[in-house]
Image: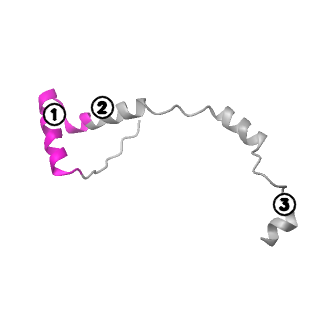
Amino acid sequence: MVKVKTTIDLPDAILERTKIAAARRRTSIKNLVIQGLEAVLREEVPVEPPADALARLQKGYHLGGKPLTRAEAHAR
């Protein structure tokens, strides 16, 4: 796993509450942030498998109208 350092700006009130919550849980602010992000990401809608997306792209989308010829497309 690659670790990347980052900086986030938090409002003073949230930072103060975060420090208190971390102390109560006997953990670090870093661990609270990781736990919070993991909780949010668990709720994310799963990404569809690449095969499904590829099949949909190969089928194509009907956007109305007729396809342009090469000459018409280049004239635009």
Q: Earlier in the sequence, mark 1 or mark 3?
A: 1
Q: Amino acid at mark 1?
A: Ala
Q: CA distance from mark 1 to mark 2?
A: 12 Å
Q: In the rendered structure, does residue 44 fall within the stretch colored magenta?
A: no
Percent position of residue 22, x then y = 16, 33
Secondary element under disc 1, as helix, strand or loop, is: helix
**Residue pushed farthest front?**
64
Q: Give the residues drawn in magenta, as a range.
A: 10-32
Task: Say which amino acid is labelled 3.
Answer: Leu
- Mark 1: give few (<14), some (14-19) or many (20+) Cα within 10 Å: some
Q: Which mark is residue 41?
A: none
Residue lying furthest top in this view? 25
Q: Looking at the image, which residue is at 12% across and 36% down?
A: 20
For the residues labelled 1 and 3, the Cα–Cα distance comes to: 61 Å
Residue situated in front as seen by the camera: 21 or 34: 21
| Label 2 sits on residue | 35
Q: Which residue is mark 3?
A: 68
According to the image, what is the colour scheme of the structure?
Answer: one colour
Kind of residue indicated by mark 2: Gln
Q: Nearer the viewer, residue 21 or 31?
A: 21
What residue is disc 1 on? 21
Sequence order check: which comes first, mark 1 or mark 2?
A: 1
